[in-house]
Amino acid sequence: AECSSSFNDSFQCACGANQGNLSDALPYFKRSLKIREDALGMEHPDVEASLNNLAAIMQEQGLWNEVVLLLKRQLVVMESTIGTDSPKMHAVYCKLATVLVDLGEFKEARAMLKKVLKLTEHTQAVESDQALPVREALVSLLTSQGWLEDAEHTVRHWYNKDRSKYDETHVIVLKDMTLLAGLLHKTGKKEEAHRVLQKAMQRTKLSLGPAHPLVAEHLNSLGEWKLGEGKLQDAETMFLRALSINEAALGHEHPAVANTLKSLCSVLTLQAREDEALPLLQRCLTIQERTLGEDHPDIADFRKHVHNRLAHMRVQSSDHDSHSHLDAPV
């Protein structure tokens, strides 16, 4: 009876989720978890799967504190069932760190990312690119909190260690150079930053080809630097080239495309080309809603910003039409 009930609950969960009725599906996910815990024990792989599913549903609804508790429980179960060497467990650590950042728990997120980095390096998972997203997330977190010296020291450590293990054209070394260049620029070491980034771009083109997403990442960095120097035309050229590469390599709805669109909008806005900027900004919002979810904390603020700019442009357009009508010859 319990197995049958669990199957029916899983079926109801799937139906509710597929139809977009997340609030209706939530009780079924909770009930399915409880049945599995009672029937199989707290540390069974099926319990871990239920915790993962329930966390995903709660994340879609923006129930972030509950998500943190579920992910922490999931990690406990995974440690006893599949061990800390599993890339799947590393992915859950990263997901938890991301949620902690959204909740403003930066120190705990930082500790979480550093822990998973040690795990990935211990298991040599870096060779299969498991550590690269974690590294980027850690550097982003350190930078956002103003811990620039810590970030630079950390990246230089990775760079020196990786150069002793890999060829200088290996993607891991190239990513180290990209991260280092960004940090150097933020700390005012702009000449060194340009040298490192140009060298990374040359090596990337030779080893991975001129249309690789990493080349687009380099172009985005150069574009941001040109934007900061007030060289708007140069910045626009860089962003357009990066956008073309990312759309071709990753698809038109990839988060990297959204990031480049946002940067391009900044350039167009500074050139008083609002009519060109706003459609791109709306496209950026659509991509982020699909990738992050419409209830994500960052989406609400961004959506409000886009809607305010649209309203402002309509008012300006209306005022312009009124003046044009008044100025017209009788």
Image (tube, helix red, strand yellow):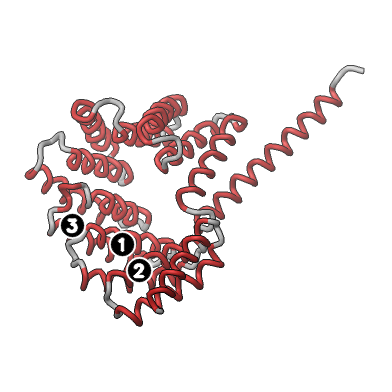
* Quadrant showing the C terminus: top right
Q: Quadrant of residue 43?
A: bottom left
x, y percent for residue 101: 39, 61
Between disc 2 and disc 1, whose residue precedes?
Answer: 2
Q: Amino acid at mark 1?
A: Val
* Quadrant showing the N terminus: bottom left
Label drawn at residue 14: none
**42, above or below 129, in the image:** below
**72, above or below 150, in the image:** below
Q: Quadrant of residue 86?
A: bottom left
> Who's the residue at 81% across and 28% down the image?
323
Q: Between residues 264 and 38, which one lies in front from this camera angle?
A: 38
Q: Between residues 247 and 311, which one lies in front from this camera angle?
A: 247
Q: Residue furthest bottom?
A: 38
Say if mark 2 contacts mark 1, CB within 8 Å. Answer: yes
Residue underneath mark 3: 120
x, y percent for residue 66: 44, 72
Label drawn at residue 92: 1
Query: Badge 1: how crowded within 10 Å, few (<14), some, or many (20+)?
Result: some
Disc 2 versus disc 3: distance between alpha carbons?
19 Å
Q: Is residue 222 visible?
A: no
Residue underneath mark 2: 71
